[in-house]
Image: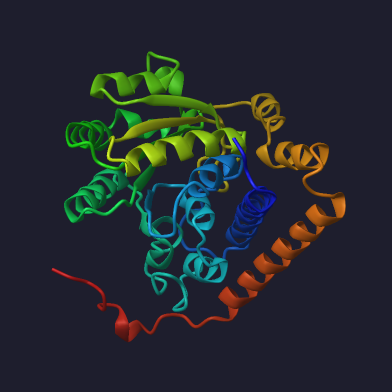
Amino acid sequence: MEISRETTLEMYRRMVRIREFELAAIDLFKRGMVKGAIHAYIGQEASAVGVCMALRHDDLIAGTHRSHGHNIAKGADTKKMMAEILGKETGYCKGRGGSMHIAAFETGSLGALAVVGAGIPIAVGAALAFKLRGEDRVAVPFTGDAGCNTGNWHEGLNMASIWDLPVVFVLENNQYGVSTRITNSCKIKDLSLRAQSYGIPGVRVDGFDVLAVYQAAKEAVERARRGEGPTLLVTESYRFEGHYAGEPEVYRDRAEVQEWRKKDPIPRFRNYLLEEGIASEGELAAIEAEVRQEIADAVKFAQESPQPDPATAMDYIYA
């Protein structure tokens, strides 16, 4: 598969952007500036970036608990995202969504939802609309491994397969659903085998390898655009942080986490870019410095942004 130098460098930039954003969000949480929880995407950056780089701007995504990464990978503005996390008026949802419910319609994000698997029926509905309108757009719901045991997941795959809807179901297996290890909730090791129940392709890839994810996602997206129906894409990865920032993590030991950290997708891809002569040390360092400044600016913007006016508390509520 031929990938341009520009594309690979943009992949690296987005992965670093996600990592720096999450580190900053965790820092703000620890300083008591975030109301609610922070569910970090650290360690899984290659999954979101590999998938979203295979999409067009007008394609749609739907997220779940760790959707800071999904939104940034799809091109969301980090200033608006950070402002939303701090509950500010300048955030994507005017401070009403917070960390777990960011929707960035301008970049094709239908929103993140706290209910496990809840983005799937929304994405399937969007895909049905695409098909009825005769549009060649694709919908991509992201779900963690715990999501594949929910009714939303099975009903969504079933409906999409029956109607050959343009959906790519991305199942990010980070090995844990909160504190429950995937081996305690699923009998099979390869979750992509579940696609066979619905007569659709199931693909399993290394979620730490952004190029492998990109290639698999590109093939699934192109298949969906041709009207050939959905694909289940399983990205095998691991969350380096707890389920939420500050979690005790008593269900796994530090040795396990450190072993998985050796697979960190960012230094892995960085080394690849250097070894293949795609970028120089100076070029990558420049990208990293630019991203760090961008996130610092986003934090400053969020901190200085106004709080929502209490008088508007009932705005945007519909019945």
Please indicate whether residue 154 sits to the left or right of residue 60 in the image: left
Res 240 visible: no
Please indicate whether residue 193 sits to the left or right of residue 67 in the image: left
Residue found at the very far left of the displayed protein = 319
Question: Between residues 311 and 140, which one lies in front from this camera angle?
Answer: 140
Report x, y in % for residue 103.
38, 62
Question: Between residues 26 and 101, which one lies in front from this camera angle?
Answer: 101
Above or below — where is 10 with respect to 240?
A: below
Report x, y in % for residue 179.
47, 31
Report x, y in % for residue 12.
67, 49
Tell me what residue is drawn at x 31 percent, y 83 percent: 312
Which quadrant would the C terminus be assigned to in this image? bottom left
Which quadrant would the N terminus be assigned to in this image? top right
User: Residue 151 appears in which quarter of the rendering?
Assistant: top left
Res 184 visible: yes
Residue found at the very far top of the displayed protein = 187
Tell me what residue is drawn at x 41 percent, y 68 percent: 106
Q: How is the image coloured?
A: rainbow
Report x, y in % for residue 77.
53, 67
Question: Between residues 209 and 146, which one lies in front from this camera angle?
Answer: 209
Q: How many marks are shown on the rendered structure?
A: 0
Tell me what residue is drawn at x 36 percent, y 39 percent: 168
User: Residue 248 appears in which quarter of the rendering?
Assistant: top right
Above or below — where is 188 with respect to 95?
A: above
Above or below — where is 93 with respect to 218?
A: below
Above or below — where is 299 with respect to 11?
A: below
